[in-house]
């Protein structure tokens, strides 16, 4: 049976990376996720991308092997969507302040 979960997970992770890069270029911003901040501080953007790829493979493999409950899928998607929306908000607020 087809599930939109994995394509959405990939899409939202790509958007998270792109919007995070853009947000971190803004003045007075920093990574809010302490794990990703640690990775960025030690391995830079390449490390962050590697972590994202690893997390997609791990969550995707668990989902494909065991099947995540719909509630868990929705929770993961909502969390990533919230992260992307927040990153966009940071970029927009910073752009307004710089005018």
Image (cartoon, grey):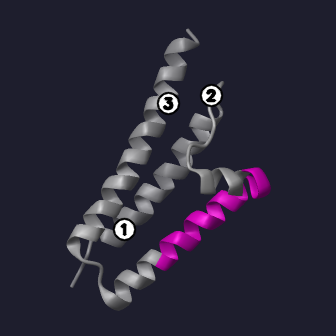
Tell which circle, 1 or 2, labels the residue nearer the N-terminal end. 1
Q: Are marks 1 and 2 in contact (CB under 8 Å)?
A: no
C-alpha separation, residue under disc 3 versus residue under disc 1 = 25 Å
- Left or right: 86 in relation to 25: left
For disc 3, the marked residue is 90
Characterize the magenta stretch by its predominant secondary structure. helix
At 50% from the left edge and 78% from the top edge, which residue is drawn? 58
**Span of residues in magenta:** 41-58
Q: Which mark is residue 26?
A: 2
What kind of element bears circle 2?
A: loop
Residue marked by disc 1 = 7
**How far is the residue under mark 2 from the one under mark 3?**
8 Å
Residue at disc 1, secondary structure: helix
- The tag earlier along the polypeptide, 2 or 3, is 2
**Which percent across, then down, holds residue 26?**
62, 28
Magenta stretch: includes residue 14: no
- The answer to whether the residue labelled 2 contacts the one labelled 3, judged by CB atoms less than 8 Å apart, is yes
């Amino acid at each position: 049976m087809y599930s939109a979960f994995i394509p959405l997970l990939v899409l939202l992770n790509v958007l998270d990376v792109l919007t995070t890069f853009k947000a971190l270029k803004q003045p007075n911003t920093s990574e809010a996720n302490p794990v990703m901040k640690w990775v960025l501080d030690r391995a830079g953007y390449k490390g962050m991308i590697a972590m994202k790829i690893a997390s997609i493979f791990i969550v995707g493999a668990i989902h494909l092997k065991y099947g995540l409950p719909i509630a868990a899928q929705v929770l993961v998607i909502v969390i990533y969507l919230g992260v992307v929306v927040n990153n966009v908000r940071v970029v927009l607020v910073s752009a307004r302040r710089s005018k």
